[in-house]
Image: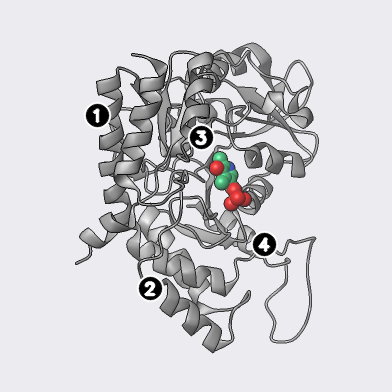
Amino acid sequence: MKIESIANAIVDFARSRYEQESIPLHRPVFEGNERQYLVECIDSNFVSSVGARVTEFEEQMAAFCGAEYAVATVNGTAALHTSLLVCGVERSTEVLSQALTFVATANAISYMGATPVFIDVDRDTLGMSPAALRTWLEGNSEMRGEARVNINTGARISACVPMHTFGLPIRVKAIAAVCDEYGIPLIEDAAESLGSFVGSKHTGTFGAAATLSFNGNKIITTGGGGMVLTNDPALAKRARHLTTTAKRAHPYEFFHDETGYNYRLPNVNAALGVAQMETLAKILEIKVEIAQGYKALCDDLNIGYLEGLEGTTPNYWLNGIELEDRESRDVILKLTNEAAVMTRPIWRLMTDLPMYADCQHDGLKNSRWLVNRVINVPSSVPESEFYRLQP
Ligand SMILES: *Cc1c(COP(=O)(O)O)cnc(C)c1O
């Protein structure tokens, strides 16, 4: 099939589903109680770091994800930073992660004074490969006393942070098993995978902690926001303490027992979050229909569609299409964007950004292969669909 015909088919598909002139990659839907809860929040005067909506949002999220604890933060990057802090990542240690990710994952590691080491991904999940993780650890690490150490640098390996790319669940059970075997805490970056499950278990519940994001482009949004998930009461308690300036509870005294952070999610954002959570099930249902549409389109066009692994339920946050090579990728990106249908390549690999160019990595063969071929296509929930499903 000619590349121009593929571009036209993608444009036609998007135009048949979305009514906007200019079709974005992902826009939020506010079709529930968002306005009402925001007005109530403003009227209550509790718009900032104290208020009932924050706790309510945390409880909703913990219940939905099947995590014991959820701690809300100002954004997903702050949630990642907090998770690394509570899981014992220290200055001058190394954290295993992905080069194929949004920059926040690597940045949070840098905030700790730690260095990322980039492990390759699997082609079918776009997330960390458990086989590549094991291979790297076998060849490059050993136990010294209680610590797992990189034999090339002498640095302790303090955590492993894989990411569920575009909401496709990774081989997280296998990754958890490798992390266990090598004595490394697992922190899942589940920023993109709210509503994605492995079997019946939600992504973000397989390690010591995990993080979510509610940025404006994510599957639900609080404007800006994030969450730390964990089953460990001590980690949850410390996350809560550190994100609220490490202030000891007291009616009027200001006693802070360590250097904390002002990372608590404001009540006004949480009000939005509570309303969004009420509509999440519907959003996920419509997402499946959009994904099925793209899958059928790609089958017709004889091009690859990123379906995810058998036995997993992706949230289909962003649909991904796999093209023949970089040249056809570039033509399709150009033609679709010129037609005001937004499509996007994957992020630059972290090793292609100046601040991470010198980081250790394992060759990143699949990461490079994917970056040259995969694009994201418009994946929002159309408002008309939303109303169709209203009770
Ligand atoms: C969105 C995102 C984050 C967090 O982003 P914030 O904008 O800080 O909420 C982290 N990691 C990944 C992979 C993301 O996509």
Q: Quadrant of residue 125?
A: top left
Residue at numbered disc 4? 263
Disc 4 vs disc 3: which is toward the camera? Answer: 3
Respond yes or no on whether mark 2 lies under 8 Å from ligand 1. Answer: no
Residue at numbered disc 2? 33
Disc 2 vs disc 1: which is toward the camera? Answer: 1
Disc 1 vs disc 4: which is toward the camera? Answer: 1
Residue at numbered disc 3? 338
**Label drawn at residue 296:** 1
Distance from the alpha carbon under mark 1 to that under mark 3: 24 Å
Q: Earlier in the sequence, mark 2 or mark 1?
A: 2
Disc 2 vs disc 4: which is toward the camera? Answer: 2
> Which residue is painted at 42% across and 54% down in the image?
67
> Which residue is painted at 48% across and 82% down in the image?
39
15 to 389, vertically: above or below:
above
- Residue type, numbered disc 4: Tyr
220 to 148, vertically: above or below:
below
> Which residue is at the front of the view, 227 or 356?
356
Disc 3 vs disc 2: which is toward the camera? Answer: 3
Q: Earlier in the sequence, mark 1 or mark 3?
A: 1
